[in-house]
Image (tube, helix red, strand yellow):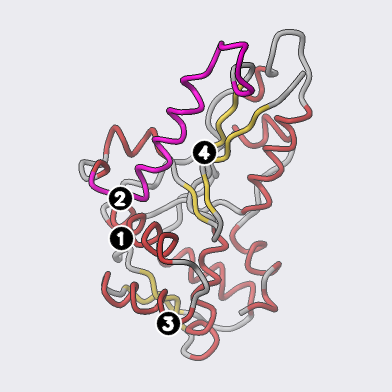
Amino acid sequence: MSRKVCITAVDGNTGFLIAELILKYRDFSRKPRLREFADLETIVMEAKGDPGVSTGTSPCIIRAGFYVENLLLYAPQAKEEGVLPLPIGDYHKFAPVALSDVAQVAAHVLTGKVKHGFDDRHRGQMIVPHALCRQRIAAAASKAFGTELQFENISHAEAKRVLKSQSELDQSEQQYLLEYYGPAKEGNTNYISTSAFHDVTGEHPTEPENFFKIYEGER
């Protein structure tokens, strides 16, 4: 059976929990880069059931949250200053997901076989099991690297300057990340699931400490 999978993420390790934010984040409609993913989902699902198009049979949308690989953009500060600068405030949490975990879920969806479409294990949202606050992020990185790192809350303007000066992301990807940090700072991106990933893959998603260990050489 043909499988059509739409992963709502773009190059540069970005993605979004669209449905939750449409319902709960009042400024979502004024975030053009975030809206792109909602529009993409709409296009995919409008064709559901139409035998004349490739996405008409068993479409699947994987909503990828904030990719934890984005934290590697701040490797220079971590290495030189011992800080992780993010404009997410001091108290609210967000739920980053490893790109490899998203790929693993997609692989299971693509290879799952039942008589009339997707396996029931492949239905629902795949969300990470941990919502991380600034202290947890810094602690995970410190443990993995064996050196003390502190979180630094920075302004939107400073975050924009950092992305522009030290990342290879194009302008639209930078804009997306900056738009994401807004709802994260207001506590609107802390959605988690303790079982969905395991139910599909039979394994547990990447823990924060393990992620930083994997990429230790890139800091």
- The mark found on residue 91 in the picture is 1
Question: Which residue appears at 53% of the width and 31% of the height?
Answer: 125
- Tell me the residue that label 4 is attached to: 63
Q: Earlier in the sequence, mark 4 or mark 3?
A: 4
Q: Secondary structure at mark 2?
A: loop
Report how many numbered discs are placed on residues in the image: 4
Q: Nearer the viewer, mark 1 or mark 4?
A: 4
Instruction: Locate the N terminus by quadrant.
Output: top right
Q: Which residues are magenta?
A: 30-55
Q: Nearer the viewer, mark 3 or mark 2?
A: 3
Q: Earlier in the sequence, mark 1 or mark 4?
A: 4
Which amino acid lies under the numbered mark 3 shown in the image of this protein? Ser
- The mark found on residue 187 in the picture is 2
- The mark found on residue 165 in the picture is 3
Q: Nearer the viewer, mark 4 or mark 3?
A: 3
- State yes or no: discs 4 and 3 in contact (Cβ < 8 Å): no
Horizontally, residue 198 falls left or right of residue 74, namely: right
- Magenta stretch encompasses residue 35: yes
Residue 128 falls in which quadrant of the image? Answer: top right
Distance CA(mark 3)–CA(mark 2)? 27 Å
Question: Which residue appears at 70% of the width and 18% of the height?
Answer: 119
Q: Earlier in the sequence, mark 4 or mark 2?
A: 4
